[in-house]
Amino acid sequence: MPAKFDLPYNPENPLYKLTDEQLEELGKEFDELHDEIFNSLGDSDARYIRNMITFQRRLIAASRGVLLFSRFKPAWVVGTAGLSLAKILENMEIGHNVMHGQWDWMNDPNIHSSTWDWDTASPAAAWKHSHNYVHHTFTNVIGKDKDVGYEIMRIDPRQPWKPSFLLQPFYNLLLMAFFEWGVAVHDLDFSAVNKGQKSRKQFNDEAKSIGIKGLRQIVKDYLVYPGLSAAASGPTHAKAGFKSAFWADFTANIVRNVWSNAIIFCGHFPDQTFVFTEDEVENETRGGWYVRQLIGAANIDGGPTFHILSGNLSYQVEHHLYPDMPSSRYQQIAPRVREICERYNLPYNTGPMRKQWGGVQRTILRLAFPGGQRRRKGVPYVEPAEVKAERIQQAERVPAFP
C-alpha cells in the first residue's frame, strides 16, 4: 500500500466518534480492569496452567507410545488423533500464551516467557519480537503490522492490486497446511532487508536460527520417532513401522497448522475488523490504542472446549486488549468488555466459526482479483435482551453479604 492516504482511512471507524475526554476515560476503565484481574491472580490460576501442561505432556507421551505400533491401523488412528490434539494444545493454549508472558507473574522458571520454547519451526526469540512486539504494538497498522495479510495477500480493497495476487487463493492453501513454516519465514521480514532497515548479517543470523530450529523439528518428527516405531516393529516390519509413524507425525502437524491458521485468521481478517494508517496512529493516546485493539480483532463464538483448543484466541478481542493476561481469564472479563463497548457505542466483533472463517476465505478469494468493495464493518454493540435478562438473574442469585 502507498505510505499516504486520505484521512480518515475508513469514515466508519468508531474511533472518530469519540471525544478526547471519552478516550481518556475509556483508557482508564480498561487499565483498571487489567489491574483488577492481576490483583486477583493466585493459586487457582497457577494450577490451571500447570494442570494443562501436565495433561498435554501425558497426552503426547501416550500418543507416542501408541504410535510405536502405528503399522496397525487402529493404533495409527488413535495415536495420530492424540498427537494432533497434543500439538494443538502445546501450540495454542500453552506455548503461545506462556511466551506472551501471561504466566510470568508466577516466577516459575519452567513456565516463563524468557525460558519457554515450543514445538514449531519458529525460534522463540524471533517469534516474540515479530508477534509480541511488532504485531501487538502496531496492530492492523498498514506498513507496520506485518501480520496484515502476512505481506503476501491483499485483504483490503484499497491495497493496490498486482497480478501476483491472483495466486493468493493457492498459496493461502499452502499457508494453511504449512503454517508453522510460513510464520517462521515471515519472522525474517524480507521487506526490511530490501528497504535497508535490516542488515544482511542480521538476516543471515536469523535465517540460521530458523534453520537450526527447523532442522530440529524435522529430525524429531520425521526421523527419531519414526525410527523408534521401526525399532518397535522388529526387523521384518521396520520399514512399515517407520513409514506409518512418519505419516502420523506429518498428519498431526498438518492438523495443528490448519487449526492454528483458521483460529488466527478468524481473529484478524473477518469483515468486522478495521485497519489503520501510520498517520492515524501517530499521536495515539492510551485510550486510542485500546480502541484500535478492540476494533482490529474479532472473536469466535464457542463452548469451553473450543475456547481451550483455540488457546482462548477465540477471545481475540480480549487478548489484544490484554496480551499479558492469563488466557483462562478472558471469558471472565468478556462481559465487562462488552458492557464498556455498549456504553461507548463501540462494536464488539464476534460470530460463529463458520461465519468468521467463511468471510475470511471470501475476502482472500475476491481480492485476488482487481477491484473489490469495502464490506460493512462492525456496528455498535447492544446487549441482546435475553443475555441481559440472564445476566440480571445471575446477579440476583448471588447472595448479599452485610
Image (cartoon, rainbow, N blue to C red):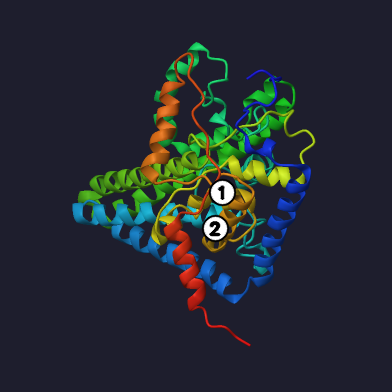
Pick the quarter of the image with the N terminus.
Answer: top right
Tag 2: Cα neighbours inside 10 Å, few (<14), some, or many (≥20)?
A: some
Horizontal and vertical percent for residue 279?
A: 74, 28
Residues at discs 1 and 2 in contact (Cβ within 8 Å): yes
Horizontal and vertical percent for residue 76?
A: 25, 52
Mark 1 or mark 2, which has the lower sequence index?
A: 1
Q: Is residue 64 above or below residue 180?
A: below
Q: Total label count?
A: 2
Q: Is residue 25 above or below residue 127?
A: below
**Marking on residue 343:** none
The one nearer the camera, 101 or 62, is 101
Question: Disc 1 to disc 2, how far (Cα)?
Answer: 9 Å
Q: Please name the residue that numbered disc 1 is placed on.
A: 317
Tag 2's secondary structure? helix
Q: Please name the residue that numbered disc 2 is placed on.
A: 334
Query: Can you tell which quarter of the image residue 69 is in?
Result: bottom left
The one nearer the camera, 2 or 205, is 2
Tag 1's secondary structure? helix
Name the kind of residue labelled 2 in the image: Ala
Horizontal and vertical percent for residue 196?
A: 74, 22
Horizontal and vertical percent for residue 80?
A: 31, 52
